[in-house]
Amino acid sequence: MVNFLNESFDLKPKHSSEEALERWRKVCGFVKNPKRRFRFTANLSKRYEAAAMRRSYKEKLRISVLVSKTAFQFISGVETSESDYVVPEEVKAAGFQLCADELGSIVEGHDLKKLKIHGGVDSIAEKLSTSTTNGLTSDTDLLNKRQQVYGINKFAEAEAKGFLIFVWEALQDMTLMILGVCAFVSLIVGIEADGQL
């Protein structure tokens, strides 16, 4: 019987093809109680539904990927096509072509698109009236203008905290709060037990 099944239907115990299962069902079509007879074989209608659902999901996913790629290309094309950056008047008057806010957004945001819009590192150095090899000029008038436009290259120092502020911050620790409550309860219980202070 097993040889007959293998030769005629190519029916395997597991992972049989849909065609082989369809032929087997057609041969056994006049079986008494077919639901019970075919309960251990694959449900072909469910398989076909699942395959159709997979195809529709793949198509929807393909469409969404294409739409997102198109949108991304449109957005990046709009951003890189023209720069809507306008040099402020006080920066132009000082002889520079970039303001401190624009430089900060490029550096802090690691924004390569803005860097490309401004022409790269060498172009930014030209706009700042400096050189990538020689650095700043030693002209005091130009240095004063640069300090007025971009500020002094120093970090703002934080004010020194007093001792009581450190104590207050230490008391905000949950462990110290629990230990303080336990010490207070122990003190009250000790006073009540001994009857004296």
Image: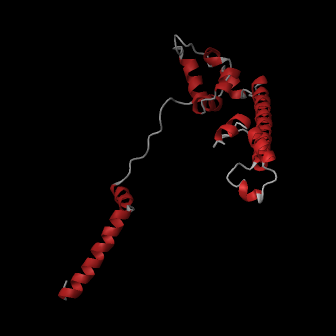
67 or 31, nearer to the observer: 31
Residue at image coords 74%, 39%:
20
For the question of whether residue 120 can be seen, the reply is: yes
**Residue projecting furthest to the bottom:** 195
Q: Residue 81 or 127: which is nearer the viewer? A: 81
Q: Residue 4: horizontal and vertical position, in percent?
A: 69, 38
Location of the N terminus by quadrant is: top right
Q: Nearer the viewer, residue 58 or 77?
A: 58
Question: Residue at the location (37% across, 61% down)?
Answer: 173
Query: Residue 33, image x and y in percent?
Result: 77, 60
Estimate the x, y position of residue 112 in percent, counting from the top left. Answer: 64, 25
Question: Quick check: 161 left or right of 77?
Answer: left
Which quadrant of the view contains residue 190? bottom left
Task: Please determine whether, in this image, residue 109 is positioned above or below residue 21.
Answer: above
Seen in the picture, residue 57 relative to 142 is either above or below; the reply is below
Q: Can residue 124 be seen in this view?
A: no
Picture quadrant where residue 166 is located: bottom left
- Judged from this view, the residue extending furthest toward the top is 133
Quadrant in the picture for the C terminus: bottom left
Colour setup of the view: secondary structure
Q: Residue at x 39, y 58 (%)?
A: 169
Horizontal and vertical percent position of residue 64: 78, 38
Residue 90 left/right relative to 162: right
Question: Would you place residue 186 above or below residue 62 in this image?
Answer: below
Nearest the viewer among 22 and 46 is 22
